[in-house]
Image: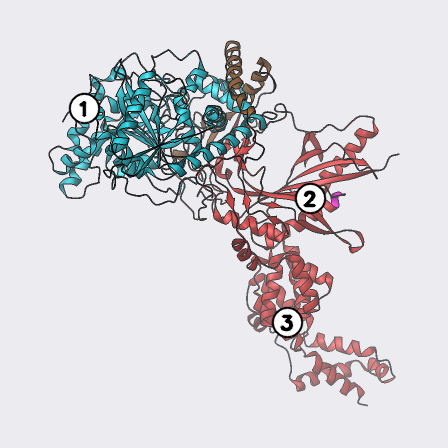
Amino acid sequence: MQQWTLTETIEKLQQKKISSVELVKKALAAAQKQEYLNAIITLTSEQALAQAKEADKNRATGSCSFLGGIPVALKDIFLTTDVRTTCASKILNNFIATYDSTAVKKLSEAGGISIGKLNMDEFAMGSSNENSSFGLVKNPWSFDRSPGGSSGGSAAAVAAGIVFGSLGTDTGGSIRQPASFSGVVGIKPTYGRVSRFGVVAFASSLDQVGVLARTVSDAAVLLQAISGHDVHDATSSPMPVPNYSRSIESGVKALRIGVPKEYFSTGLQPEVAQAIEAAIQLYQKLGATIVEISLPHTDYAISAYYVICTAEASANLARYDGARYGLSLGREQGLASMYEKTRDAGFGAEVKRRIILGTYVLAAGYYDAYYKKASQVRTLLAQDFAQAFQQCDVILGPTTPTTAFKLGEKLTDPLQMYLGDVFTVSCNLAGLPGLSLPCGFDRQNLPIGMQLLGKHFDEPTLFRVARAYERETRWHHTHPPLFSGI
Amino acid sequence: MLGIDIQTVKHIAHLARLDLSEEELANLTRDLAVILQHVNQLKKLDLSDVNPTTHAVVEKCSLRKDTLISSPPLATALQNAPEKEADTFFRVPKVIEK
Amino acid sequence: MIEFEAVIGLEVHAQLSTQTKLFCGCSTAFGAPPNSQTCPVCLALPGALPVPNEKAVEYAVMAALALDCDIQAISEWSRKNYFYPDLPKGYQITQFDKPYALGGGVEITGEKQTTRKIELVRIHMEEDAGKNIHSENGDYSLIDFNRASVPLIEIVSQPQLRTPEEAAQYLRRLRQILVSIGVCDGNMEQGSFRCDANVSIRPRGEKKLGTRVELKNINSFKFVTQAIHFEIVRQEQVITSGQSVVQETRLWDSNAKLSKSMRRKEEADDYRYFPDPDLPLLLIDSAFIDQLRRHLPELPQKKLARFVSEMGLSHYDAQILTDDHEVAQFFEQAMLHYHAPKTLANLLISQVMGWMNAHDQIINKIKIAPKDLASLAKKIDADEISGKIAKEILTEILQTGESPEQVMAKKDLIQIKDTSLIEAAAKKIIADNPKQHEQYQAGKIAVFGYFVGQLMKATQGKANPGLANEILKKLLDEK
C-alpha cells in the first residue's frame, strides 16, 4: 500500500479491497505522526470519518462517486461551511465559513474527502510558507528547508504521503513552486478553468485553483473533478471541459517542445540546469521536436507581476476591517482606531508590505507610472507566448532557479524572495496553464522540478507531455524518508 | 519618479488603514524603495502602442438572470459579527473626531 | 454691485427597479427586516464574487435610450476604494473610465415656453451601499446591508442649469421619463431617486467657472429649490464680503433650512480607481439595444404631443394627463371603451383628479375603473345624464367602488325621459310662476334659464335636458 497512486487506490476501493474509512483513518494517523511538518492548520477528523462511512455505505448499495472516498486536503484558503477558514492569518483566526467554495463542493461530490485545512503563506502571499501566523512548514525532504509557498502545506501533505492529493491556489507560482521544492506534481490550470467562488482572493486576475498530487495521472483525475463553469464566478470560462486522462498515455511523437532561451541565462543552480537538459534529451529520444524559442520580455515579468498582484490584493484585503467578521480590535477609540488597529495586528509583515506597495501603485500620481505600465507589459508577455506557441505545443523549462532554500534564508530580502518566481509568474499574467513535475534531485537530495506551460485550455496536452516523461523515470516513486504513504 | 520617503509611506499606510509603528514605517520605506527600484526597469520599455490587459482569458462578462435567490437566514449573516445589536444589526464604533 | 449668475449641475442616483441586486440574487424589496436580504456576496465575505444582473443592464440601457445617450458597445467596471462601514468590500463597484453611456439630455421649458436641452455628461451603473444608522446617545452605528449592492444608475448633467427652478424642473422631467419607461419607481422619500447638486456662482458674463460646492441630502422635490437657492445666496454673501468660496461638500438640513459644511472625515479621498479584475468587459451589442429600443414605452413628451395632435386636446390638458404616466395609462384605457377625448379629459381632470387631490389618493388606488369612466362619459354625451348628475355619480363611485349603473339605481338617478312626466312638471312650474311667464312672453329670453332651473329642481335634476328644453319651450310659447 506504500506506493499506491490515487488511481490505483480508486480501483482498490471499487474492488472493495479497502474501505474509505480505512483510508481516512490511515490519513489521520499519518497526519498525527507527521505533525512536526506543521502542514495542517485544522484537522477535520469527525467530518472526514462521517463522510467516509457514507462513501462506504453508498458503495455497498452500488451508487458511488467516481473518486469513491479518497482522503485529500484543502489549502486553508478555501471556504468550508462550519469549518474554520483562516488563510493562515490572525485576522481570520476564528472565522467560521458560512458557505462552501465551488471547487470544494465539486471535489466532495466527486468523492474526495477532506481531512483538514492546510497551512499556507498568509493570504497566499509568499514563496516559502514562512509567512503563516500558524508557523512555518517543513519540507518533508529536509526539515530545515522550505517546502515552497504559498501552498506549502498542500505540497508537504502530499509529499509526506499524508493525503493522495490536495487543493491549492496559484497566483504567481504558488502551486508549481512548492510542487517543485517538495517533489510532487502540481498543476495550475488555465485562468477561468476552475471557479474562484469561495476562494479567498489575493489577486483576482491571477488567482487560479489547482491541484497537487503524487503522479501526473492523479493530478489529472483530481483536476477533472473540480473543473468547469460556475455561475457564481463571472471570470469562470464556459469552455467545455475535455477528458484530461483520455490521451494521457499518447506520448510525444510529433509534438513540438519549446525551450525559452531566456530561461537558461538566469542564475540557474547547476544541477537544475543539468536535470532540465537531461529531460530535453529524453523528450527528444521519445520523438518530440525541440524548438528554441524566445520569450523576450521575461526579465520584466516579476516587476509587472508584483505591481499588478499587490494592487489587486490591496483592494481585495480592504474588507478585513473588523466590522463584519474576523479579528476586531481598537473599537473603544472609534471607527478609525478599529480599522487601523485591527489591520495592524491582524496582518503579518509580508501582507502589510504588499498592501502598502499595492496601494502605492494605484495612488494618484503613481497609477500611470506603475499600474498602467505593468498592465501594458502584461500584454507584451501574452504576445510573447502567443508568438512562441506558433512554433511549439508546450514550453519546457525549470520551475525554479534553485532547489528548496533553507528556512530563514530569504527573509531579510523581500526582493530576492520575489526574484525566485521568475519562471512561474508569466504564466499567471498570461492566464496559461502550467504544470510542475519532479525531474531529479540535487546533491543534497532535494527535489528538482520541471515546468511545462501550455496553450489556453490545453491541459490535456500538458498532462500527456508530462506523463510521457514520468513513465520513463522513477522520480514519482521516490519518497522522502518518513513518507507515510497511505 | 518621486522618491519614496517616510511621509509618503505614512500617507499610503493611512489610505490602507494600517497603523504602523515607527520601526515598521522605516522598514517598509526601505523595502518599498528597493522593490520600486527594480520595478522602475519598466520605464525602459516603449509602451506607446500597447493596450493594457486586465483580463487575460475571459473577455466578456457573463450576466445572470434577475431571479430571486433566497438569502441565508439572519443568524448566518451575523454569525461571525464581532459586535451585533439585537441580533439584527452589525454594530461598529462611530467616527470620533480628533 | 456685481450681478452673479448661478451654475448648477445635478448628479442623480436612480435605483433600477429590478427584483434582485446588482451583483447577487438577494431581493431588493424595500422595508424588509434589517440584514435579512444579504448573502456572502453583498456582505463581502472572504471568497465572494460579483456577477452582474442582466435586467439591471437592460434597464440601464433603456434609461440611456430614453435620455438620448450614446450607448457604448464596450464598458468597464471599476473599483472605487475607500473605507466606510456601509461599504462592505472596502470598495464600490462602479464604472469610472468607461461608463456605458455618454451624452444625451433632458429638455426643460424655460421662460416664454422656450425649450432648452440640458445635456448630460454620462450615465454609469454602480452598486449602492448599505445603510448606516447612527445611534443617538451611544458611540456606535448600526449597519443594515439590505441595500448593499442594489443597482443604481448615476446620471450626471452638464453644469447648464441656471436657476433653482430649472433644477427642479430638470429633476421632475428626468424622474418622469425614468418612471414612465418602468426602470425606476422614482420614490425620493424611500431613496430610489436621489439628487446631489453642484453649485457655483460667477459674475454674469464670466466664462470661467467659480468654485463649486457639492450639496447633499436633498431628499425631496420640495427641498431642491430651497437648498439650491440658499446655497446661491450663501455663496453670493461669501464673495461680496471679500472671501472666497471653499470647495467642499455641504449637507442640506431641511429642518433648519440651511446647508452645513460636512465635517471633514479625512483629507481628500484618493479613490485609486482601477478596472475590476473580477468582472470582464461589459459588452452591449446593437441587436440588444435595438430590441430594447423597439419595446421602449412611449416617452412623456411624445405622448403629450400625440394627445395634442391626434386627440385635439389642449396643450394644458394634455400636460396634466401625461405628467403622471399612470394617469395617462388610465386615460388611454378609458379611450379604448369610448373614444371621446375631450369629454373623458374633462371628467378625469376636473372631477376624478380633483377628488384624488382632495383625498390624497393616487390613480392606481381609486375605485373607479377606466371602463366605468368611459361609460359615464358616454351617458353624458348621449344626454342621458347632466353634468351635475355625472359628478354626483362619480363621487359616489369613488367612495364606494360601485358601478355607475348600481349607483344610478341606488340613488334613483335614472334619467326621466318620460315626456308626459316632464310635461306635467313643466306645466306646474309655469302655472306657479305667472310673472316669469309674462316676462318670457314679453321677449325676455333669459328667463328661460330660470324655468330650466326650476324644472331641474323639481325633477331632482333627472329630467332629460334636451326633452326638458323642448317641452318648456313649447309650453312657454303657448299662449
Chain colored cyan: A
Chain colored red: C
Q: Is residue A257 left or right of residue C5?
A: left
Kindly identify which numbered label has been placed on residue C222: 2
Chain colored brown: B
Q: Which residues are magenta?
A: C160-165
Q: Chain of mark 2?
A: C
Q: Residue furthest bottom?
A: C479
Q: Main secondary structure of the magenta part?
A: loop
The amino acid at mark 2 is Lys
The amino acid at mark 3 is Ala
Residue at the (65%, 70%) spot, across then down:
C390
The C terminus of chain C lies in quadrant: bottom right
Q: Chain of mark 3?
A: C
| Residue tagged 3 | C377
Callout 2: 10 Å neighbours few (<14), some, many (20+)?
few
Residue A15 placed where, x, y %?
Answer: 12, 38
Of residues B9 and A256, the one drawn nearer to the viewer in this rendering? A256
The amino acid at mark 1 is Gly
Residue A185 placed where, x, y %?
Answer: 28, 28
Q: Is residue A480 left or right of residue C38?
A: left
Q: Image height check: is C108 above or below C51?
A: below
The question of residue C271 being in magenta is answered with no
Residue C159 placed where, x, y %?
Answer: 72, 41
User: Residue A22: in sight, yes or no?
Assistant: yes
Q: Secondary structure at mark 1?
A: loop
| Residue tagged 1 | A485
Q: Secondary structure at mark 2?
A: helix
Q: Is residue C361 left or right of residue C48?
A: right
